[in-house]
């Protein structure tokens, strides 16, 4: 029973290591002349939009870490039993080793999903802020001079 409790605590702590993005990792600036209070309201709206856009990805990352740890512990317990003919000591050792291996695999898989979630969050946030007329890196400012291109931007105006 003690091992089961310790296993559940370990799985819970590993799953807690994975978190959803809490904000954008890109800089967006208000367009010239926009009041900062308006920009702050738009920022909040776009953060909510981006968080909703990636909700499923974040949940999948959390589940993946916990599931991999549980499967690893079960496989480790089975391997421990088979290798030493069913000794309860070896089942516990196998489960512990399986938990560590499963947790490591789960952490690697969920880390990839977490990075993917941050990229998707940033894209949704950029789209929202750009649609509100804010300055997004690598994109021309809306409503400005159509023939203006920032130096070395690669943007060419339509002729």
Image (cartoon, rainbow, N blue to C red):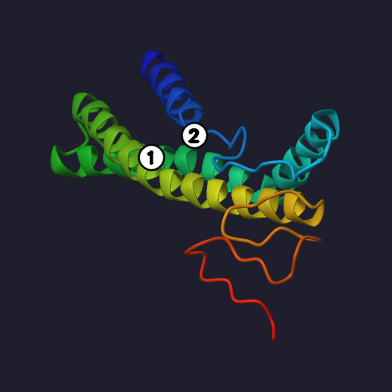
Residue 84 at x, y = what percent?
Answer: 13, 37
Nearer to us in this view, 159 or 70:
159
Residue at 64%, 43% (x, y): give it.
28
Q: Is residue 107 left or right of residue 18?
A: left
Q: Give the quadrant of the N terminus.
A: top left
Q: Position of residue 138 (x, y in %)?
A: 57, 59
Decide: is 126 above or below 95: below
User: Image quadrant of residue 30?
Assistant: top right
Q: What element carries label 2?
A: loop
Query: Callout 2 environment at 10 Å: few (<14), some (14 to 19), or many (20+)?
Result: many
Q: Where is residue 107 in the image (x, y as percent from the top left)?
A: 38, 40
Q: Which element is circle 1 on?
A: helix
| Quadrant for the C terminus in the image | bottom right
Discs 1, 2 touching: Cβ within 8 Å: yes
Label at residue 18: 2
Q: Name the residue under label 1.
A: 107
Residue at horizontal 79%, vertical 56%?
131
Residue at screen point 74% across, 54% down: 130
């Amino acid at each position: 029973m003690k091992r089961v409790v310790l296993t559940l605590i370990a799985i819970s702590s590993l799953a807690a290591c994975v978190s959803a993005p809490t904000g954008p990792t890109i800089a967006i600036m208000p367009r010239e002349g926009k009041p900062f209070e308006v920009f702050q309201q738009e920022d909040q709206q776009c953060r909510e939009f981006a968080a909703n856009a990636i909700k499923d990805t974040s949940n999948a990352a959390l589940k993946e870490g916990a599931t991999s740890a549980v499967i690893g512990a079960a496989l480790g317990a089975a391997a421990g039993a088979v290798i030493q003919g069913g000794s309860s000591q070896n089942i516990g050792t196998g489960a512990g080793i399986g938990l560590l291996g499963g947790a490591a695999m789960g952490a690697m898989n969920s880390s990839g999903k977490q990075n993917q979630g941050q990229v998707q969050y940033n894209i949704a946030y950029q789209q929202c802020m750009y649609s509100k007329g804010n300055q997004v890196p690598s994109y021309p400012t809306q409503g400005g001079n159509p023939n203006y291109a920032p130096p070395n931007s690669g943007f060419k105006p339509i002729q």
